[in-house]
């Protein structure tokens, strides 16, 4: 990418399509929002680009784009009709899955039907064993018969998943070659996810076959609509981007790209805040985020219907165990934990007399009672009743909230519980907080991490009202609310590296010479290196990360450990840290080798502003009564856009932004950093 | 209203999170596929008087049974429990269920007001129970065709595996010397200990954060809450007495079917569940101990309660369970019990549902497969497998255990589920590729058994077919049911198909019994075809 190229990150959401543009010539960052166009999302993208970049004065634009096209196709079951080919005897694996039922105590719950119905599932005679040896060779004539059979169906996309194909891919490859020649789009499990455990591999391969044609169609439309000189890349769920050519064939890697963009954005915020320590005047009381140089965030993205949380310990955590819409997806994705609690979560009283919040939500329609349509109380209504949300400033004043409707909705609950309206509202907020605190504990405490070592990074529309209470509950001392909170995902796409993940299951014993592992890893690394070069990366900007999934022999769950000459030591240390025990003498085994090839994208230069007076009086617009957890306090309101770097705002206070409201507890102190971010020091 | 409805909800999460976290840790850090891949375990926490406060949603058959483990150690040790102790047990007649289920209970202590100079007091218990793939006895997998419990494996009465933080090597060595796969047992026990430690630490943190008065009040309030929910449910069922009976195929020794009978009497907000009329305890291992019968009752009512109610002692408070001693539903020492846990428990649920279908027909499905199709294959690892592991061999024996899914009963509003586990178990299958890597076995087929579900307005779910070829001489133990008496349909729905166990040797097929141990030769193929679920309602013409 040359230094004069305009860079744009684009995130398509349900309501808005967000744009963040970086112009290297004046080092300025611009954000922009247009209404999404769900029938054809590319329309909003092209519209926004046209408005943002007047065509006359640019010739090179580099776009990274997070698309919900693949996600929605899967969630709404609107993917391409797909056929599946398996080893003879195993066509039903996709449906049987792991043979467990979705809910333990619900006699009526059913999983969603398999993506490929029985009539589209086919078998071929062939078999490879666990040593990678062929037991039954594949006969070409059977492939030809299958092509004839499948050609008679209304199917373009074919998934192939044969047993032990990761050890011996040639059978899948032969089927793939023939079907591709016959004009089918083919997803081979040995190409998509060459790892053991046949159900998860089949599911991942089938999802790819199911969503890729949709992505292909979408990206074709989008790229042909782009002016000349515009280069497009697509965001993946692993936090990096890939070329559109690759995305059209491996759309499964893009399924969770939106939230992944958010996490990459958080990571960028971390580097920005870190890099700026020297510019922060100590007399303003700003302290460095952590003692050492590691970015440690618990990210907290609270929206209307759900809340996403994740942990960044230097790097975001990666998982290969995600499940989306009942389909396991076994590729590396950023580990984001989602719970069904948000501003729109409904409160109710159950038959046992407990106050419940969620999991059902008022959604966009009818929305919280205070939006003017719904009748049932939500978390947002509770915040309004407590004075934490200000009715006339919601969404920059474009959507006034109805205080009396919120009170009326709360009254039903309060009467059932024998509480005042205010007590009921406080209860709803504390229970919502309990849900979210539990989610934050799952990703930190349960992984052996102490939340007190982390900064809570709050973004998303509803987070600013809850961050302080959550931080206190978890012993977190600092909260960061980034300036670009509502477009953080698009921001992340702007800064995302190109990332390609490779893996192969090897199942080798501990006494395997390190040389053998190195050789196998270097095959993957070469693949990654070449792929990045072919996308125009310079070798200097390529980073290769090697790791190994290991376990004690006999265990059936692996732990990913960075590759080194002392693999055993690394494994034992990690095992002790996460599980609280390790065995010194038991042999280990190497299960899956992994390589991540990263093409570094030049990071955005930061432009810290000089710190000015701590006095925020110029941004103060009013004073209101607000109910904090302890009592009602007279609380000044500030317009966040008017605050300047260096301002210090002691609690109680409310900072109002068009996209979010930030509640500063009476025990907390907020400051504006040189980038316009808000940091909050949490008092006990 | 006697307790703050807001705190109630908050503490519900706090307690549930502890049991969940224990479960996550146990699953991730355990050794054997049985715990890790199949998730055949449960974790729970109890208050200081031994009442179940929270149990993670793992395996229903452990539900009613876990509290009896805590009661057993309270009775056994009385005041002789101290900080850092961990008690191990598997004796079905003293807190256990069947021998492969090993339970570890950790009493949890804390110094009042965090004052380390005052002696710590008991604040509760953390417990984990896991199904170990082998615990010795006459057949690999420890679920043999036995006629007394001594043949089923090593019996562990409540003993301290850990004293004041130190593992008792003697006890551990004694256990490991009596099992076929000591290395695996050792790893799984360490994982259970780690899970208990984690649960204990979290319980201590909870008491430190909220204080013992508030935490104890909250746990009592949660018990009362679940009890109110159960009473509310019972109050909505029509008063009356509802009886139902069904038969197990046999006990493995005599061809005589074994009767299971229940009479549920609903009176206002209480219920009596009476198993009088069920068969006397049998010679084979289909005997359920009282804990198992309790679990089946617990599970059945828990299903009617709705999703989000905490699993605690309050659930059974308004329900009286009568199981006549020395009957199949309350077997006495030294009856063999391995199958009571996995088979009779499963069928007891169908019998309970059959009775409830008369009280609330719109909520109750037809019979599900009614068996867990337990298969165990074990023996000596072949030489080439040992060589493959190149001097790192961790044992010379293997024991593979698996339960197979089947069809579930059709519902009043929908077809039954196919190839899925029902009722008292929800264990995952062992992936074919994991299984073939670990054991000298090859899977030949794993498919739905089409048209095995019963016909009806809504049809029952289909069973499955799993075909395994053994690559070495070894022993197969079958513990299956519904091979003669099919899963019943409801309201005019037809029964599901019975299961079949087949041996294919030298291209000759023969039928295997529902229960028993068979010597297999390398190259033998066994095909297990599991039952379908019953249909619901008459099929329209």
Image: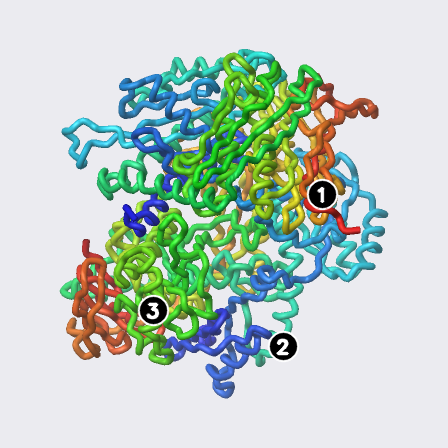
Instruction: Check whether the beta carbons of the residues at disc 3 and disc 1 lie within 8 A of each other.
Output: no
Vertical position of residue B289 compared to residue A131: above or below: above
Mark 1 packing: few (<14 Cα in 10 Å), some, or many (20+)? some
The percent position of residue A237, horizontal first and vertical second, equals 51, 58
**Regarding mark 2 in the picture, which secondary structure is present there?**
helix
Q: In the drawing, what numbered circle is on residue B492?
A: 1
Cα separation, mark 2 vs mark 1, equals: 61 Å
Frontmost residue, B204 versus B358: B358
Which residue is identified by label 3?
Answer: A408
Front: mark 2 or 3: 3
Determine the chain carrying the residue at label 1. Answer: B
Which residue is identified by label 2?
Answer: A224
Determine the chain carrying the residue at label 3. Answer: A
Vertical position of residue A676 compared to residue B108: above or below: below
Q: Is residue B240 left or right of residue A571?
A: right
Front: mark 3 or 1: 1
Q: Is residue B70 left or right of residue A149?
A: left
Marked residue nearer the N-terminal end (2 or 3): 2
State whether discs 2 and 1 lie on one chain: no
Determine the chain carrying the residue at label 2. Answer: A
């Amino acid at each position: 990418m040359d230094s004069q190229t305009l860079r744009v990150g684009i995130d398509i959401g349900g309501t808005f399509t967000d744009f963040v543009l970086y112009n290297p010539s004046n080092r300025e960052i611009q954000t922009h929002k247009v209404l999404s166009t769900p029938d054809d999302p590319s329309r909003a993208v092209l519209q926004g680009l046209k408005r943002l970049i007047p065509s006359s004065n640019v010739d090179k634009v580099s776009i990274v784009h997070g698309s919900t096209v693949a996600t929605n196709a899967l969630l709404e079951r609107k993917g391409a009709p797909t056929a599946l080919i398996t080893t003879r005897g195993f066509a039903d694996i996709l449906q049987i899955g792991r043979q467990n039922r979705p809910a333990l105590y619900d006699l009526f719950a059913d999983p969603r039907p398999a993506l490929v119905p029985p009539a589209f599932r086919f078998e071929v005679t062939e078999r490879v064993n666990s040593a990678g040896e062929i037991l039954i060779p594949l006969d070409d004539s059977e492939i030809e018969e299958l092509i004839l059979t499948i050609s008679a169906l209304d199917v373009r996309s074919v998934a192939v998943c044969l047993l032990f194909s990761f050890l011996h891919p040639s059978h899948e490859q032969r089927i793939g070659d023939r079907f591709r020649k016959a004009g089918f789009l083919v997803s081979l499990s040995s190409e998509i996810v060459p790892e053991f455990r046949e159900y998860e591999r089949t599911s991942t391969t089938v999802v790819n076959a199911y969503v890729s044609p949709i992505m292909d169609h979408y990206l074709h439309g989008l790229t042909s609509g782009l002016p000349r000189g515009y280069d497009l890349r697509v965001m993946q769920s692993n936090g990096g981007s890939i070329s559109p050519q690759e995305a059209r064939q491996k759309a499964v890697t893009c399924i969770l790209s939106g939230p992944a963009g958010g996490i990459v954005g958080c990571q960028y915020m971390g580097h920005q805040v870190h890099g700026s320590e020297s510019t922060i005047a100590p007399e303003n009381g700003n302290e460095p985020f952590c003692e050492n140089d590691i970015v440690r965030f618990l990210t907290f993205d609270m929206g209307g219907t759900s809340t996403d949380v994740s942990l960044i310990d230097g790097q975001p955590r990666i998982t290969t165990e995600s499940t989306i819409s009942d389909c396991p997806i076994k590729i590396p994705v950023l580990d984001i934990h989602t719970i069904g609690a948000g501003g729109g979560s409904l409160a109710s009283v159950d038959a046992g007399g407990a106050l419940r919040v969620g999991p059902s939500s008022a959604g966009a329609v009818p929305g919280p009672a205070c939006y003017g349509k719904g009748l049932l109380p939500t978390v947002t209504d509770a915040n309004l009743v407590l004075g934490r949300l200000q009715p006339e400033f919601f969404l920059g004043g474009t959507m006034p909230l109805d205080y009396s409707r919120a009170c009326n909705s709360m009254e039903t609950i309060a009467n059932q519980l024998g509480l005042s309206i205010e007590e009921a509202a406080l209860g709803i907020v504390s229970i919502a907080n309990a849900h979210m605190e539990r989610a934050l504990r799952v990703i930190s405490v349960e992984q052996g991490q102490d939340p007190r070592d982390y900064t809570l990074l709050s973004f998303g529309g509803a987070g600013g009202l809850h961050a302080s209470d959550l931080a206190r509950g978890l012993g977190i001392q600092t909260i960061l609310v980034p300036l670009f909170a509502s477009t953080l995902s698009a921001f992340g796409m702007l800064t995302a590296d190109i990332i390609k993940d490779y893996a192969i299951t090897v199942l080798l014993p501990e006494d395997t010479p390190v040389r053998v592992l190195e050789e196998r890893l270097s095959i993957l690394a070469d693949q990654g290196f070449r792929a990045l070069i072919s996308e125009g990366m310079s070798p200097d900007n390529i980073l290769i990360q090697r790791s190994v999934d290991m376990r004690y022999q006999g265990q059936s769950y692996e732990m990913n450990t960075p590759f080194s000459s002392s693999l055993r030591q690394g494994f034992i240390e990690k095992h002790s840290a996460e599980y609280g025990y390790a065995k010194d003498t038991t042999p280990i085994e190497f299960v899956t080798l992994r390589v991540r090839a990263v093409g570094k994208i030049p990071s955005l230069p930061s432009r810290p502003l000089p710190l000015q007076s701590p006095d925020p009086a110029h941004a103060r617009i009013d004073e209101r009564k607000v109910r904090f957890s302890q009592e009602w306090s007279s609380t000044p309101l500030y317009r966040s856009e008017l605050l300047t770097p260096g301002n210090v705002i002691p609690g109680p206070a409310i900072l109002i932004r068009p996209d979010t409201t930030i509640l500063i507890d009476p025990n907390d102190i907020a400051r504006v950093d040189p980038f316009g971010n808000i940091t909050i020091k949490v008092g006990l | 209203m006697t307790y703050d409805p807001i705190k109630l909800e908050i503490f519900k999460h706090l307690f549930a999170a502890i049991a969940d976290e224990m479960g996550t840790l146990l699953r991730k850090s355990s050794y054997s596929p049985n715990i890790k891949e199949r998730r055949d375990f449960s974790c729970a926490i109890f208050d200081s008087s031994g009442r179940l406060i929270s149990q993670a949603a793992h395996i229903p058959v452990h539900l009613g049974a876990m509290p009896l483990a805590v009661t057993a150690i309270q009775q056994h040790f009385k005041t002789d429990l101290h900080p850092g102790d961990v008690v191990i047990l598997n004796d079905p007649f003293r807190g256990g269920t069947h021998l492969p289920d090993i339970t570890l209970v950790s009493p949890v202590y804390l110094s009042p007001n965090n004052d380390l100079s005052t002696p710590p007091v008991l604040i509760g218990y953390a417990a984990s129970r896991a199904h170990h793939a082998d615990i010795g006895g006459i057949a690999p997998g420890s679920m043999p065709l036995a006629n007394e419990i001594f043949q089923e494996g090593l019996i562990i009465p409540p003993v301290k595996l850990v004293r004041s933080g130190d593992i008792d090597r003697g006890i551990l060595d004694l256990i490991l010397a009596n099992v076929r796969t000591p290395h695996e047992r050792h790893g799984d026990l360490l994982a259970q200990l780690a899970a208990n430690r984690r649960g204990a630490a979290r319980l201590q943190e909870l008491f430190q954060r909220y204080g013992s008065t508030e935490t104890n009040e909250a746990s009592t309030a949660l018990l009362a809450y679940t009890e109110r929910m159960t009473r509310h449910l019972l109050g909505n069922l029509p008063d009356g007495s509802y009886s139902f009976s069904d038969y197990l195929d046999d006990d493995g020794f005599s061809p005589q079917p074994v009767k299971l009978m229940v009479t549920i009497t609903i009176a206002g907000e209480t219920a009596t569940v009476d198993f009088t009329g069920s068969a006397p305890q049998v010679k084979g291992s289909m005997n359920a101990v009282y804990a198992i019968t309790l679990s089946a009752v617990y599970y059945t009512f828990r299903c009617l309660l709705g999703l989000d109610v905490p699993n605690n002692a309050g659930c059974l408070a308004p329900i009286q369970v009568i199981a006549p001693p020395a009957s199949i539903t309350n077997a006495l020492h030294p009856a063999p019990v391995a199958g009571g846990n996995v088979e009779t428990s499963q069928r007891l649920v169908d019998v309970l549902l059959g009775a409830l279908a008369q009280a609330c027909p719109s909520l109750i499905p037809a019979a599900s497969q009614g068996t867990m199709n337990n298969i165990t294959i074990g023996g000596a690892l072949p030489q080439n497998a040992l060589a493959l592991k190149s001097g790192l061999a961790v044992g010379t024996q293997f024991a593979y255990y698996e339960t197979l899914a089947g069809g579930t009963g059709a519902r009043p509003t929908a077809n039954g589920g196919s190839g899925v586990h029902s009722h008292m178990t929800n264990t995952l299958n062992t992936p074919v590729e994991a299984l073939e890597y670990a054991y000298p076995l090859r899977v030949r087929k794993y498919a739905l058994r089409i048209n095995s579900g019963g016909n009806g307005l809504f049809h029952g779910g289909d069973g499955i077919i799993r075909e395994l070829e053994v690559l070495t001489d070894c022993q197969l133990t079958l513990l299956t049911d519904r091979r003669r008496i099919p899963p019943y349909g409801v309201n005019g729905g037809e029964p599901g198909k019975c299961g079949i166990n087949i041996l294919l040797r030298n291209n000759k097929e023969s039928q295997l019994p529902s229960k028993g141990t068979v010597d297999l030769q390398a190259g033998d193929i066994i095909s297990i075809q599991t039952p379908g679920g019953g249909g619901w309602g008459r099929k329209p013409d």
